[in-house]
Amino acid sequence: MTEAAFRLRDIVQVFPGVRALDGANLTVHPGEVHGLVGENGAGKSTIIKVLAGVYQPAEGHIDVGGTAISPATPEKIHAAGVRFIHQELHLVPHFTVTESVFMGQELAGPMGLATTRMRRAAEAFMRDQLGSALPGNRLIRDLSPAERKLVQVARALIDGEARVVVFDEPTAPLASEEVLKIMKAIEQLKSRGIAILYVSHYLNEITELCDRVTVFRKGKDVAVFDEITADTGTELVSAMIGRELDAFFPATSRQAGEVALRLQGFSDGQTFEDVTLDIRRGEIFGIAGLIGSGREELVDALYGLRRRASGTLTLDGTVLDTQSAANAVANGMVLVPRDRRHDGLVLPMTVEENATLATLDESSSLGLIDRKRIREVTQKLIGDLDIRPANARAVTRYLSGGNQQKVVLARWLAKSAKIFIFDEPTVGVDVGAKSEIYQLIENLASEGAIILMSSSDPIELVGTCDRVAVMMRGEVRTIIEKDALNVDHLVAMTTGATDMPEVAHAG
């Protein structure tokens, strides 16, 4: 085979307390589309930043086109012909296509900017290289997400110097029909001999588009698939997971009750639509989905943090007003947010202050706070949740991630909520604290609470949930019952490696 377009060898990247890359390798050849897959935290984003020169690895070698680059800086990497198409669309809405393509690399003429030449060049590139007939004078704000992504590609490649293009989750924000436009553009680039590194959680795209695939797990390359077959999707899942369910999930003898919470026709008009779910009292109901699936936006809309365009929410037949977070709490619905440090806690406050924020009215009389009552409530919560240190006056900022999460939960236990939404409940939490949090969630369900758990961790969902709704591109595609839940199957469903049946009934 020809000289590699780029080769990363034995890369080690260390952050405080974390070995993000542990001797990782990645090789991509000219004229191939090479997939990079792995679970969240596997090291994919880190190795892309190493290739981009953003991170300087502690060990390892980087060469592009057979030439060693050391140290690898962003300027050297760009000069070597490596370009990056990121998931985020950093485009100015009121710019034209031409202005966006040439921003920072404008062409000059005798009278200033060569606007006509740039427009013609942008239109020709879009047409000939990306297969899109976009007018150069069209405004970015008037384009579809897929068209904006093509403009982003054109901007990276218009100088004609690209030898390698890295696509990092390029289709995450796109609808299914728009993905085809991006895949067609990538095929065009491949035909010109450009090396493509394609990073995606959508395994159906990986197996359809890629010539070879590298799998990362725990900071290492654990497998390279040199041949893509009908069975590759399943094999990729097994390589990505590489482990069985951990033993720290609580045992349960719970039996869910009747349907209590009903979402009907939920839509925000942008990222998810027509979501209908029936959730039973005393069950732990999971929501799975990748970035761009609409999972996070659905959670935010449920709790009133995001405006919904349509849909109703009922509890035991009574319509709930949750168009704001305050209304949601008033109706007994609470959220343990995915970003506890920014959205769930006031870090300079003490455990006592954070735990009782939602119940100050119940601990006050004539505008005066009953400090004794607050202390008693807090100490009971600290004992029930085993918050460490067992000190109500400890500053929350200095607690571990698991104990911070328990403080958020303590606040809502004090409020006697009926519906608990857990959004990424154990992100950044150590194994021991995870086990305790899972047990707390199990206890709530056993006491008859309604539990929704939104998570990007398939092991977490399989280990705790009674049913899991799988979202993809803004829709609930299927609901998996407990007896059919296993990690490989759930990963295959969320990534599109396995075709999903349509949801016949959400209850």
Image (tube, rainbow, N blue to C red):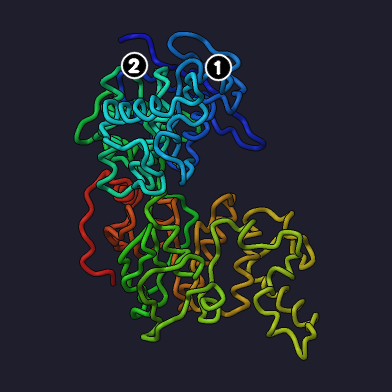
Viewer-side residue, 95 vs 409 = 95
Q: Secondary structure at mark 1?
A: helix
CA–CA distance in space, label 1 to label 2: 19 Å
Position of 399 relative to 163 (above/below): below
Q: Is residue 201 visible?
A: no
Of 185 and 36, which appears nearest the observer? 185
Tag 1 near tag 2, CB within 8 Å = no
| Three-letter code for the amino acid on which mark 2 is drawn | Pro
| Mark 2, residue position | 30
Q: Nearer the viewer, residue 133 or 73?
A: 133
Image quadrant where one finds the N terminus: top left
| Quarter that holds the C terminus | bottom left
Q: Is residue 190 above or below residue 233?
A: above
Considering only vertical position in the picture, is 232 above or below 498? above
Q: Residue at the spot x=42%, y=40% of the render?
A: 96
Image position, residue 241 (x, y; %): 39, 41
Query: Which residue is label 1 attached to?
Result: 76
Left or right position of 312 against 404: left
Q: In the displayed structure, does residue 15 sit left or right of residue 462?
A: right
